[in-house]
Image (tube, helix red, strand yellow):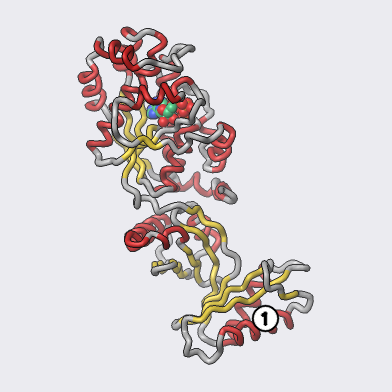
Amino acid sequence: MITEVMVRYGELSTKGKNKKQFIKQLDNNVKNALNEYRGLKIKSHRDRMHIELNDESADIIINKLKVIFGIQTISPVIKVEKSIEKAKEAALFLVKSNYEPGRTFKVNTKRADHEWMFDTNEVNQMLGEYIMNSIPEIKVKMKKPDINVRVEVRLDGIFLSIDSIKGAGGLPTGTSGKGMLMLSGGIDSPVAGYYAMKRGIQVEAVHFHSPPYTSPQALQKAKDLTEKLVKFSGPLPFIEVPFTEIQETIKRVVPQGYIMTITRRMMLRITDQLREQRSGLAIINGESLGQVASQTMESMSVINEVTHTPILRPLISMDKTDIIEVAQKINTFELAILPYEDCCTIFTPPKPRTKPKLVHVLEIEEKMDIHGLIERAIQGIKIEEISANNNQESKQKHIFEDLL
Ligand code: ATP
Ligand code: MG
């Protein structure tokens, strides 16, 4: 009986001038996510989107919508012609599908068509009575009922819905511009990528690896993590940067305590150049204040010194346990804890400086051919478009149930 799914935009509707562009982007993102269902009719309006179903399952469509940013709520809807009898049947169907003994309800009617023969009070009353007659033990409750039957009388029909399913929130991916995500094989950076996407950033993944010191499995793991993020953003480029020469050079010329700092500075320089080449506006990483030696304020400021580009650190104030919780919900955790060493762990000595000094760093870097190293790394990049693996996706349906 569900004839369509209605989507409300939430925060989007406060965006003033940008609103049109936001709605257009969301429309695009939804159409991409649902492109295998050719029969759907998707129409975006100023304050909501309607997705008309043919014979698709409302549940499957809703599950796909749940991971799309920019959506506040999702409601299964029954559209009927403008007949009070039809509206009664539909309202009863919706209430029954959610009724358990003891539950209360309320009918809440809005009218866009002011010419229609019944006003909102009359509709509330007639539908309410019909429901009470059909389910004798049910009670009406005006404040916070268990089941809120929303009825909207519009020019082209009557739309009835009950529960609003919580959407993913945030802003539609693509509305905030492009950012380069520094993606390792760890727990944190995929979560940072998820949060960047949530605020509308179109993410490109940059991954540094050092064959033969790092294995093909470690590289594949980073790609697999990227694939997990695709469902939130749509296909995205994975940029693989060869880092072996740089790490070998660092190992040769840099005193132990500064290896980590200089390694990070090189990564950041390269990421920033890629960002510029590809018209990105920001860099995103998975740093969380105080988590490890590279993530003290002193360390971050010395590393950050190589660029003025905004570095977004969505996890900066999160505790590790909270980060892990999100990683589990977005399904990146299990992959992230697979024991393949990434390029940094192999070369970084056990005791990096937590308070590196910039003057020392600059002195040490004098001994390196920074420019040449960066140029050769960038010449060696490989770019691969990562898109969703549909077989895996069905197994992940449950994951988004109660995120946020
Ligand atoms: P993660 O769990 O994301 O690896 P972490 O807690 O292990 O983070 P670090 O290893 O210090 O912390 O890395 C800090 C950040 O630097 C990472 O979150 C990531 O954004 C970036 N980074 C580290 N290693 C790489 C890599 N091999 N390729 C790309 N980015 C990296
Ligand atoms: Mg790491």
Per the image, the residue denoted by label 1 is 128
**55 is higher (above) or lower (below) than 226:** below
Which quarter of the picture shows residue 179?
top left
Q: Residue 118: x and y, percent?
A: 56, 89
Quadrant the N terminus occupies: bottom right
Residue 184, can we see it? no
Residue 38, can we see it? yes
Give me the residue at 38% from left, 13% from top. Answer: 258
Which quarter of the picture shows residue 225?
top left
288 lies left or right of 262: right
Q: Residue 388: x and y, percent?
A: 42, 45
Give me the residue at 42% from left, 55% from top. Answer: 33
**153 is higher (above) or lower (below) than 398:** below
Q: Nearer the viewer, residue 78 or 246?
A: 246
* Amino acid beneath label 1: Gly
**137 is higher (above) or lower (below) than 277:** below
